[in-house]
Amino acid sequence: MKKYNYIVLPFVLASLGLGFSSCSENEDPIVEVPPVEEAFIEINGGGSTFPNMAFVDLSKEVQTAVRRDSWDLAFNSGSEFNVLINGTTGAMAYETEFTDFAQVGADLEQELRSAGSLDLTFSNLDGIKYVDNPSNPLAEFNVLGQAATSAQSAKVFVINRGESGAESKPWKKIKIYRSNNAYIIEHAEVNSNQITSVQISKDEDFNFVYFSFENGKVEVEPKKSEWDFVWTAGTSSTPFPQAFEGRLAYFFQDLTYHNIYGGVSAIQIMEANIPFDSFSVAELSGLELDSENRLVLGSNWRSGGGPNSEPNIRNDRYYIIKDKNGNHYKLRFLSLTSGGERGRPSLEYALVK
Amino acid sequence: MFRIDLNKINVIILLFLLVVNFSVLADRKGVVKDIDGKSIPFASITWSQDSGVVADEEGHFSIPDTLKNQKIRVSAIGYETSVMDINDSTSIIKVQLSPNTTELTEVVVTGYIDPQSAKQSVYQVRTISKDIIKNRAAGNIQEVLNTELGIRFSQDNAIGSSNLEMMGMAGQNIKVLIDGVPMVGRQGVNNEININQIDVNQIERIEIVEGPMSVVYGADALAGVINIITKRPETSKFLLNARIQEESVGSDYQFAQGKGNHIRSIQSQWGLSEKWSFGLGYTNNAFGGWKGENIGRQFAWLPRNQHLANTQVNFNNNNVELNYSLDYLNETITSYGPENRVEVIDSEFLTKRWMHRLNGTYTFSPNVKTSVQAGFTNYTRETITKFTNIRTGEQGLATGPDSQAKLQYSGLNFRSTTYWKLANKLALSGGLDLNYEEGQGDRISENEGIADLAAFLSAEWKPTDKLSIRPGIRSTYNSAYTAPPIIPSVNGRFNITDALNFKFGYARGFRAPSIRELYFNFFDASHSIIGNPDLKAETSHSFNTSLAMDRKVSDKVKVESSLSGFYNDVKNQITYGISPEDPRLTSLFNLEEFKTGGLMIRNKILLGKSSLDLGMSRIGRFNRISSEIPALEPMLWSTEINSNLGIYLPFADSYLNVFYKWTGALPAFVLDTESESGARAVQMDGFHWMDFTFKKSLFGNLDFTVGVRNLLDIKNIQSNTGDGSAHSGGASRPVGYGRSYFIGMNYQLFK
């Protein structure tokens, strides 16, 4: 049934990627592979339960699919020490006033559960306090903040690992602090005091180092120079007057982030202003591509549907994406479904000439 | 308007007279017609105290040639009696009778074994006759009821269905019956029936009873009962009714098929003998849909194709009356998905329904009678979703969740009522009511069905001709929830004068939780809804009263007026809420209190064959937020005004009809923390609806109707919700698809 199949296994990509990066960085006179000029991609989102994050590298026409629930925390590999929770499963975190694990137990969990504080639902009007900022978590707000400078000053956080399109898992309590240029994470189940401690070192080739409570360090996103955007599901927000600061944390399917931390920028263009087909290099001048807000594509490229309409692609818009190597691509989504099933959207793109 | 068929009684009397006068030679011919030129069947023609004849079905009669220079009296039920001279020059005697407005007596059957005159019934019943349905050239029941007071429709255009609200209460509180047998719909037995899945062409009349009739009909009738009475064949008569109607949908129209609304119907009835009669009918309603503001493939009003068939067998003997009816519905609603550069997705909603009904009456003696009503309904609704890849042409069934779904309900219903006249002034009715309902479907959790067993007893006490009081009780056992042990009710009528009567009613109403509310589960990325098998019944105290006057001002002028009021106090209303055990789940609870109340004034003036109806209602709905914010007014009121004008044009021998209703704005409040009072007023705007029809009869058996539906071009009404909300479904609600035009033809053949 599938005519287009562009799934590339992560390890294949990783080995390819390694090869290329070594080429370019060493400035050896080896022939550069020219960027892909035109392509059609069906995103390997995994189908109607949208289990995957799919990282796409436009110039190489490859995508890497990773399960959304394969990780729990993302540790900033840059100069800062922010740690992100897994918004792609709708994870939420609550900062306790304690620095001692023993003081956080089942009572607090029960309190949080019955108050619904760590539930990503419409009725949780304060939800936005317990999730990372969706558009630029490193610059704007991340709920875990900067890792503490010492074990003694690190607060205990309670983490709901996310149940949005993901299987429910027991909640965790965690503490994160720095150790030289690395992180130490201590974690346990909320009602247990069996603490596991893991050291996480930064890796400059990647935006983040990913961590799973079960599997320790895990591979999730490709090297920062080897992807342009990721299609996933994830926590974003929606205006809601009654909610805290007028915004309600809400879980979106088909959420697309471009790689702002890897030097990729993007802009949305309306078909009515410049038609996709006639967009050329001449139109690039004066365009201000956004490298601060990773939600330029977001879920703007599709409509969510309503009582009388099905969710669908918005055919009136497309995107210009500039990759790290300065290639400008024009990209538009074509279909929200494949074989009538959500979670396998398709898109086409072309190098702007 | 309905006439008691006293003609039949006359036939018997006059047949007897005929036998007496058998020796008379009959060779002078005549014919009896009404002022439209339509034949009047079975008129009686008399010329002396004990001599007379009866005209046949087509109005033809013969009288003895020996009658000269005498006067004959020609009379027929429903018409003014005419006296005319017979002289030599008259070759064919042509008699024209004008209608007698005072003889038009409405009959109703809801709540009784035998038809009662609407005036004498203790219940407040509105009837809508097949003549009104015909005058409106209606294609479905919604087009008949949309100008009735106290009735509102809301379109569910995502699935091509419509829901009914009555007396301020939602569709799940309205019992929809066909010949006394409950209907089964998408939500199971008697919950939110899509009333448009009924063939309007097989309807004799619609009886609308306001107020709960829980004692007689059981659960779900908190707001009222809509009983649809189907046509029955008449004895020794063949009747064929063929109808064809072409209608635009807004400005969309294609001849015969495709865009527009195309109605084809043929209904036949055949009385084989005094004992046996049969009926057979078929209707096709092909609605081409309406795109509205959509420019692509999507429709705002989904295309719908309905095939409706019915058949019936009747048997009548001295003391046995039996009717078996079978109705079949096959409906396909097509939802075209939005355009896409690669793949488009279309869905079909296929509904099939078989409804078997058995109605029987056995008369043991003039004072004891038993009736049985049994029904079996099988209802299935399938969703079929297909994808088409426009680039490759590949097609197939969509694989996503809920893309292919099937829902099936079966309902078995048996009711037996025995009427026993104990004395002249006192009669008892009692019986058993058994209902079994079973639902299966992708989203319905496993269940063993719901069995409901009830016994009921009522007495009708008529101490004088003027007064009638009917108290009743019902006791119910239900397998799925705890039913209230005893439901009482009392209804009464008092004739203050011949022209003025007063009715009152009190009933304890209740609504059983439906299979859907008990067992329906729905989970996806943003919904977690779970049924609650521990739900109790909703209960209500319901009061209604009316004062009705009808007066014949002159031979041609009659005035009818009524003033009625109602009040319902509902407890334990079933409503959605957050589960206390798990705040992530939405479930159903017996939480809310709800009240409705209202006043209704209806007036009718009959002027010969013309008539004017004028009515107004003011209905209040409980402001739920007032229980949280007591400063707010507890009841929110909305007004409705309707008027029907029927004008007979004698020069053209045709009828003009205008049907009009103003549905007033529906106010409500929503919680708003930013507002000073903590709540914000919102409202759904009001709208005017008007239909116009023109009917002309030709040759006595062919009716032409042309008209305009939705003359005022209503499409959507604004639902003024103020600020946006997270799940805003758009601030407008569909009401109509714009001004539409129709032309129809109705041919009637009877022998």
Image (tube, coloured by chain):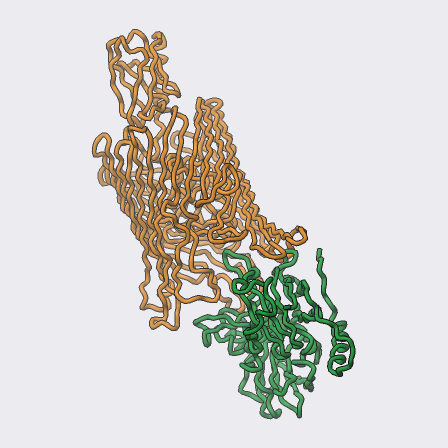
Left or right of residue B70, residue A270 in this image: right
Q: Tell me the colour chain A is drawn in.
A: green
Relative to B409, is B584 above or below?
below
Q: Is residue B30 left or right of residue B331?
A: left
- Tell me, yes or no, if residue A47 can be seen here: yes
- Horizontal and vertical percent for residue B232? 45, 31
How far across and down, in percent of the image, does residue B71 sit? 24, 14
Q: Residue at x 60, y 54 (%)?
A: B344
Image quarter of residue B247: top left
Q: Which chain is orange?
A: B
**Split into 4 quadrants, where in the image is the C terminus of chain B?**
top left
Of residues B675 and B271, the one nearer the viewer is B675
Q: Nearer the viewer, residue A20 or B33?
A: A20
Q: Quadrant of the N terminus of chain B?
A: top left
Farthest residue, direction front: A282
Of residues B49 and B732, which is closer to you in this image? B732
Q: Quadrant of residue A290?
A: bottom right
Give above or below for A30 relative to B749. Answer: below
Q: Residue at x 65, y 62 (%)?
A: A47
What residue is rendered at 77% in x and 75% in y?
A31
Q: Residue furthest left?
A: B553
Nearest the viewer among B679 and B623 is B679
Q: In this rendering, does residue A73 appear at all?
A: no
